[in-house]
Image (tube, rainbow, N blue to C red):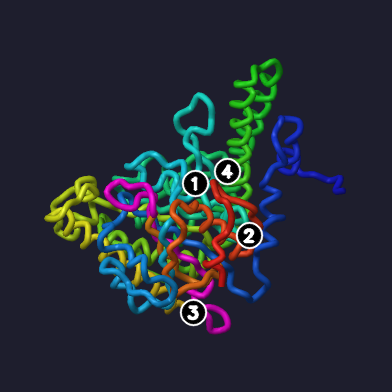
Amino acid sequence: MKTSFNRRHFLRGTGALIALPALESIGFRRFASAASTTPGTPPKRSVFLGTGFGMTKETWFPDVAKTGTDYELSEGLSPLVRHKSDITVVQGCSNQFTNEAHWGSTFWLTGANRYSVAGQNMANSISVDQVVAQQLGQETRFSSIQLNSSELQGHGPGLSLAWDQRGKPVAGQSDPVQVFHKLFSADDLPLEQRQAAIAENRSVLDAVLSEAKRVQRGLSTTDTDKLDEYFQGIRDIETRLNKDEDWLDVPKIKAPLDEPAPGLKGKAEIEIMYQLIVAALQTDSTRALTYRLPASTLLQSLDLKPSAHNVSHYSPGERMEASKKRDKVHSELLAGLIDKLKATKEAGGSSLFDHTTVTFGSNISSIHYLTNCPTVIAGRGANLKLGQHLVLPEDTPLCNVWLTMLQGMGIEAERHGDSSGIVKELQA
């Protein structure tokens, strides 16, 4: 056993003293080795693209009578025809605890029971992208990247698609220009000033910990739980400070694309966000990305008049035609993203597509229905069987798909959310 500890190791190792489990800022690095790659082998990555109000039931889902590789893409998925052998369309999945028809993303990646905490009407758990970030994120500058639209109709509570291990929302960024600078722009402050800022933040954390431990004795069970959650938050901050310090003297990689134009909305916003996703993966700035896609601004950019909410209540006529057009544009944009992933080469002649898994979908199917979550999977980063149409038994936990994906990435996970097992038909 090591007998020498610096101050940060001591803070990390005081879990028993402050009634917390072992700090995972150490565990993350240990677990990461199980799923990390050998030198010279491109790493695995995951991308989750979530849309709010779902799709058009009549024209998005392929015919359930034709499954496996012998199926035809639907009208809504037809722009993906050139990638048909490299995508899998999944039907039949849902999150059993979902009960909010306007929350297309809040529980999409978590499968959590909203009422799992007594006395609260809103609880969540860790999202699958953050499980990936825990395992693979210690080797990159950013453990994960969360992207948002500037408007978020149909998505529900949350600061992005991501939720941390406490079920707390993880913040996202909605401005492509800011995302670009976060990824690629050098910090203007001298190294010494940045080191001093981190040291000052650590000093504040020390003081906070000292005060928190002083009032720990004699608390009620409820207050103890609250304090434990508080300690968890402090630990998360400490982990982020460690990450910042690790990368202080490592210059950011030159951007493989130009700075985006300001003020992009709708379709143009999605196009540039997809380019930034490819750039972030290409430079290995992160290996876990999520993007909450826009709804109303996408319709506006397509010169469609109905609001995103009204389109979600479509019936034959203007609203349904708007819904169908939106679906096809999403498929066109997804096809373009796949084009870029395939065109971006990596070591040994492989491509980003060969080492990345992309999932497009929503917690809502259509017209606020909460069954048969639309799910399209592309990319070979999770050793999944592509080129097929799967129709799983009704109400199969969507988290079974996430669990299969995690295991396919080499991440040791026994379950995720409300999962009941893996989807064998998805395994390559």
Alpha-carbon distance for marks 3 and 4?
34 Å
Which mark sits nearer the N-terminus, 3 or 4?
4
The boundaries of the magenta stretch are 346-372
Q: Which residue is mark 3?
A: 345
Q: Which mark is residue 411?
A: 2
Could you tell me residue 269's position as x and y percent?
29, 59
Callout 1: helix, strand or loop?
loop
| Amino acid marked by disc 3 | Lys
Please tell me which residue is depicted at 49% across the width and 35% down the height of the picture.
123
Residue sitting farthest toward the bottom: 349
Callout 3: helix, strand or loop?
loop
Q: Which residue is mark 4?
A: 165
Q: Which mark is residue 103?
A: none
Please tell me which residue is depicted at 45% across the width and 51% down the height of the picture.
395
Alpha-carbon distance for marks 1 and 2?
18 Å
Which mark sits nearer the N-terminus, 2 or 3?
3
Tell me where residue 407 sits by quadrant: bottom right
Tell me where residue 206 sits by quadrant: top right
| Amino acid marked by disc 1 | Gly
From this view, report whether residue 296 is shown above or below residue 404: above
